[in-house]
Each structure stands twice: as C-alpha cells, then as structure tokens.
Image (tube, grey):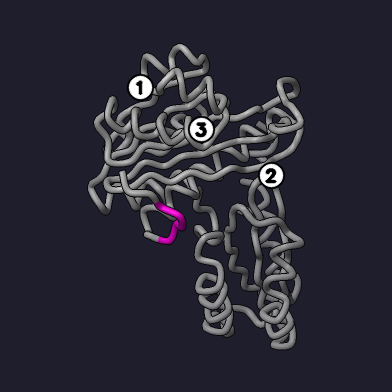
Amino acid sequence: GVPYEMKSIFSEHVVPLIRERFETVHLYHRTVLTQGIGESFLADRMSGWEDRLRNDGLGLAYLPSPGMVKLRITSYQGDSEAELVDSYIQELKAELPVAVYGEEEQTLPEVVGNLLRERRQTVGTVESCTGGAICAALTSVAGSSDYVQGGLITYSNTLKNNLADVDPKVIEQFGAVSREVVEQMALGGKKQLGVDWCISVSGIAGPDGGSDQKPVGTVWIGIAGPEWVWSKQFQFGDHRGRNVQMSVLSALNSLRCSLLGIIPEKKNN
C-alpha cells in the first residue's frame, strides 16, 4: 500500500505546495520506445541525430532494460518546444522503423493488438522455450479476445509433431532449435489454430542444454503470415529469465514488423 499512498499524497498535496511556494521550471518530456537494439549500438547509429538534438538545447537519456531501450527527450523550456521535440522523434522513427515500436507508456502487446484489430486479423502461438509467455503477453491486454485465438505449448518434440505438424525427420536432422523446425511450427500452428498470423519459438533458455554449436541463449523465432513464412536466429545471454523475456519482446516486435510489411527475408508459403 505504501507506494500507492505515497504517490497519491505527493501528486495531490506535495506538488501543489511546491508550486505555490517556489518558482519551478517546467520540463517537457517525450519518451520513445525501442526494441532489439542495444544502448551502445543505438548511440552509435544515432550519434549525428543526438549531437544536433543536444546542440538545440534538448536533453536525452538512455533508459535500458532487457530487450529494450527507452529514449527520453527533454525540453527545459516546457512545451513551447513541443514541435521541435516531435521533429526529432519523427526522424528517429524514420531511421529506425524496425526498432521503434511506440511512445510513452505503450507496450508491445498493445501495439501489436491495435494493428491486428485494425486489420481484423487473428494470431496464435506455438511455443517451446517460452512456455506460453508470448500468448500470455498478448492476452494481458483488455479486449485481446478480438484477435488472439490461443496457443500451443509444444515443449516436447512429440507435441511438436502431434500438435504443430512438425516432421520428426526434420527435428532429427536439424534439431528442435533450428530454422527448419520453427518454420514448420509456425506453419503448422497457423493451420491448426485457424489464424492469420502464427508466432513460433524454440530455443535453449538455460542454464543447461547448450552446446558449442547452439550455446545457451540461442533462440529461433518464426512468423507465418497469410502469404509467407519468416524466421530468424537470436543470441541472447545465459540467464534463463532474461532469455524468456527477450524472446517474448523479440517475437512480438517481429510480428509488429510483419504486420507493417517491414520485415526482411520472407519466404512464400
């Protein structure tokens, strides 16, 4: 109870007293949300953009967390510089459309859900290493029954065969954590669940189970759409919880990019 009570007391009583007794500087903040690109890579990629932004008297903060980085742009002149701040945000979106997924308090499940609802399309999942976490993230949004049909948790190879129509010979030849298997999982799940889009994931979350060829943190994500299938290998870290978290974010952002038509290397079904 303390955090909620403290926030209420602060916003309703403390802040008005501060404004009454002191001359305060009004700050204007905008926050841009990115996924799939690390803080240092982001800073290198946008170094010229950042230099111009700071030369215009704006502030920039990098706020990283597993799988995502928030960029907070600050004007020290208040909302009189709102248009200037927005111009920098539009530049960032144009330069990094695959990474930038939203602003302020938006979440990836909300962004993906809005895109699916606008298109009147449905989604399902076939999950191995994430154990249903992707479907849980999608259904965390109120009204997600409009577009989420359900998910298959195919942790074992037997269920990959029986529920998602993965060929046992493909698993034997390439291993459960492979491009070939996640693409069959996505295509099989799309058919079994009767959805427009299907996300599949198979990986080695850890801390055990890795090899020289496929170390802990190796994750394959697949997306099957109305006309094509796509897959990509990701290499995360050696922490099981963070690997699952980053797999969920990467899968949802991959679906977002698929819905917007900005995902590369598609294969026709």
Indicate which label's residue lies in the foreground, 1 or 2. 1
Point out which mark residue 165 bears: 1
**Does residue 263 belong to the magenta stretch?**
yes
Does residue 77 appear left or right of residue 156 in this picture?
right
What is the quadrant of residue 130 in the picture?
top right
SS category of the residue bearing label 3: strand
Q: Which residue is drawn at 35% across and 28% down?
A: 189
Estimate the spatial distance between the alpha carbons at disc 1 and disc 3, rounded to whole Å.
Answer: 15 Å
**Does residue 30 belong to the magenta stretch?**
no
Give neighbour class at mark 3: few <14, some 14-19, many 20+ (Cα, 10 Å): many
Image height check: is 5 above or below 193? below
Q: Residue at x 71, y 33 (%)?
A: 213
Point out which mark residue 201 bears: 3
Point out which mark residue 66 bears: 2
Does residue 157 appear left or right of residue 163 in this picture?
right
Residue range (magenta): 262-266
